[in-house]
Image (cartoon, rainbow, N blue to C red):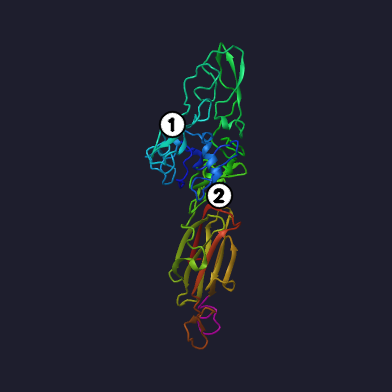
Amino acid sequence: MQRHGATRNVGQRPTWLDNRQCMTSPFGILCQGGSSAAGIGVRNFSLVSVLLCYLLAGACASSTEETRGSGTGGDIGCGEEICDGFDNDCDGLVDEDCPCDDGDEQDCYTGSPTTVGIGECDRGTQSCVGTAWGSCDGSVLPTEDICDGLDNDCDGVVDQDCPCESGTQEDCYSGSAVTEGIGECKGGSRTCVNEVWGPCEGEVTPAPEQCNGLDDDCDGLTDLDDEPGSVLCPPVPNGTADCVGNTCVVGDCDPDYADVNGTLADGCECHADPVPVTTGDQCANAISLGTLTDANADVVTVTGNGAPAGREIWWSFNGVDDTDTNGDEYHVDVRFLTNPGNAYEMDVYRDGCGGTHQVASSETDAFDWYTDFPRTNTGCSQTAPCGEGNCVAAPAPPGVNTCSDDTAVYYVAVRTTTGLAHCDAFTLELSNGVH
């Protein structure tokens, strides 16, 4: 958060302005969460509204420890006063050691910011004499309750430690006065028992905002209007949670992770395979498996899964047809060794990735591209050997076939049958001359 150093009309900067809002006031909700060019968390309001919000900063009280310091931006703690129009050292005084213009005045309050505007506690005024700020005059700070019908200690409860008439009841509210009646917050009642006031029963005071469709912290805003889902909901493994329909759900996953089971507790539980997910994501980017020859009966196995949803994984290899010496035979085979629940399917392409090159579509078991022309020495009507596979490399002599070279590059794409994410792994075997 950037600072707006020109504002000087409050003594204790309301801490909820950093990323939330000034509380409801007679002027309405003046400041709301967000960011602006002014850098003070103002959204859709004029400078007059901003100044009024600061003047009513007692409604935005938070703990001294939460008060923001430095004017250089960011949510940081109390620090050294740096003459930027804010109470950087959290002492209730703004720029108290900085030069000022003679006759200027500003509000001030040196008590805990959680007490200003509660009970008898009120702000005072600082005046500039020459070029230095004077003392904070006229402020009322918390004192011990003295049984006078007033909230002297500014805790929202009147004479809580004073004798009372047994059986007497009265309204009570221990939260900040500006939150009562806002959102879920409401007052309760207390009863005098043996001349001692009992607890305030039935009251609801501000609580951290949750993803439940309610204004839990009583600031006039509900759920995502108040905080992002990652704040409203608990952290999840390998991703972030979000608030959807008043319910915490898994939101965005970290790179290479996916939420398959929809369970908030384990977040994005599925780690993609292979990684990164851009690996082999299209034909032009296919994972090369090198050369598989039928003479060597080469075979290779690969694994993967269907995370994230819609992913397709491509592999390629060069299936080499050797020089045939005992028949024209060539067997390129691609098969699932494991395909849990037939959740995966494959397409196979030969010598290209276009439609005319496709030789298998949506196959869930196995695919075989082969030539199988045998050569034999028995049963020949003419000179042995014979058969369709009685071939030699070109040029062939009369009466002998020419063996064809069926060498080709194959492309294999695997995806889930539904397009949905699936985390159970498949195993794919790719071979030449094995089956």
Q: Secondary structure at mark 1?
A: loop
- Where does label 1 land, which residue? 136
| Nearer the observer, 33 or 431 | 33
**Quadrant housing residue 247:** top right
Lower position in the chain sequence, tag 1 or tag 2: 1
In this view, the residue in front, 313 or 379, is 313
Residue 369: assigned label: none
Label 2 element class: loop
The main secondary structure of the magenta stretch is loop
Which residues lie in the magenta part? 374-386
User: Can residue 32 be seen?
Assistant: no
Q: Is residue 351 magenta?
A: no
Kindly identify which residue carries mark 2: 260
Q: Where in the figure is residue 253, as x and y percent of width and height?
A: 51, 50
The nearer-to-camera label among 1 and 2 is 1
Is 377 magenta? The answer is yes
Picture coordinates of residue 112, whole percent (x, y): 46, 30
